Image (cartoon, grey):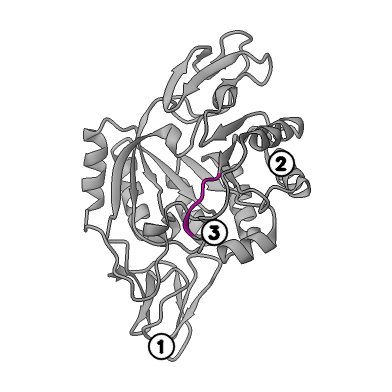
Amino acid sequence: MIPGMFSEPNGEGIVKCTLCPHLCVLKEAQTGKCSVRKNFGGKLYSLNSDKVTAIHSDPIEKKPLYHFLPGSESLSIAAMGCNFKCVFCQNHSISIVTEGSELAGEDIDPEEIVQAAIRAGASSVSYTYTEPTVYFELMYETAIAAKNAGLKNVMVSNGFISEPALDQMIPLLDGANIDLKSFSEKFYSEQCGGRLAPVIETIRNLSSSDCWLELTTLLIPEINTSETEIEMLTSFISETNPEIPWHVSRFFPHYRFGDKEPTDTGLIEKVLNHGEKNGIKYVYGGNFDSGKWGDTRCHKCGETLINRRGYHTAAIGLSHGKCENCAAEIPGVWN
């Protein structure tokens, strides 16, 4: 256990966790909704920020980030836990923690993580797999060490983080991918145990910062695929910043949605076309052989700039962040 950041004493040994919008008020020995932050003696402690449960070098495209150092490796780390309880979670074995669960992981110093990234030839460290908000202390200290070593930092998150915590993290972040799971408060409440509005604020705050931002939506048949919802979601992205890349991923049966069918790829292509028509300049398909939907094309002349097949990436028309055909500036982090 290590002292938890972002808490307020609430009198009589009660402590309020202000790390995420749940704002859990905890009596002695209680844990928050994430089950990894606990009140001991009127003080908040993190139960997971000294337990790295996963560490692996991945292609940056796996996050997914397509406009951020394409073709590079990112050392990816996680600790167990999440502040959502998504019924379709694809990493539920390490994300879904209940009170009293044993937390697996090793106590790995942030400097050791950074040295592992350097040995792996990685250009960045990614905080991913589970929800990095709930291992904030580990993410924050590692991000400082990574910056000092000349590495970039990437946060892959559900976006359910308090504004003070995000404000403290943003100066250390170079890239982020936020799951925009739906554009329905009902969906967030019933399927995730959270709320949409704070995620929207996180996206807006990241979009107005110097951190490169991409978004991902897992398309679940008959759950978040209505035409009305897709219209609202794509309009929101386009109005916020039409240059934010949007990844639409294919759902496969997982966790409590194990009896559902995978998403039809034709539906994904229909949604991607809708995103383009609504003004989003860069739309991508994920979790299937996406063909042209995996490539980056110039928004001005349509030339293919980056070709992708699986995680194999080839820059064929991009030079110094510009289209070689028409010299248009392509938004992203290229160096």
Instruction: Assign the N terminus to one quadrant of the image.
Output: bottom left
Residue at screen point 64% across, 36% down = 268
Which badge, 3 or 1, comes first in the chain's sequence?
Answer: 1
Q: Position of residue 104 (x, y in %)?
A: 27, 62
User: Please, is residue 250 above or below residue 96 in the view?
Assistant: above
Q: Main secondary structure of the magenta part?
A: loop
User: Please, is residue 104 above or below residue 307 in the view?
Assistant: below
Q: Secondary structure at mark 2?
A: helix
Q: CA distance from mark 3 to mark 2?
A: 20 Å
Residue projecting furthest to the bottom: 12
- Binning the other alpha carbons within 10 Å of mark 3 as few (below 14), some (14 to 19) or many (20 upward) gives many
Disc 2 residue type (three-letter): Thr
- Binning the other alpha carbons within 10 Å of mark 2 as few (below 14), some (14 to 19) or many (20 upward) gives many
Which badge, 1 or 2, comes first in the chain's sequence?
Answer: 1
Q: Position of residue 198 (x, y in %)?
A: 61, 59
Q: Secondary structure at mark 1?
A: loop
Q: Secondary structure at mark 3?
A: loop
Give the label, 1 or 2, closer to the camera.
Answer: 2
Q: Position of residue 237 (x, y in %)?
A: 68, 41
Give the residues drawn in magenta, as a range: 251-255
Give the label, 3 or 1, closer to the camera.
Answer: 3
- Name the disc covering residue 160, or none: 3
Q: Position of residue 212 (x, y in %)?
A: 52, 37
Residue 290 left/right relative to 243: left
| Residue at numbered disc 1 | 13
Give the label, 3 or 2, closer to the camera.
Answer: 2
User: Please, is residue 241 above or below residue 184 in the view?
Assistant: above
| Residue 108 within the magenta-colored segment of the rendering | no
Disc 3 residue type (three-letter): Phe
| Residue at numbered disc 2 | 234
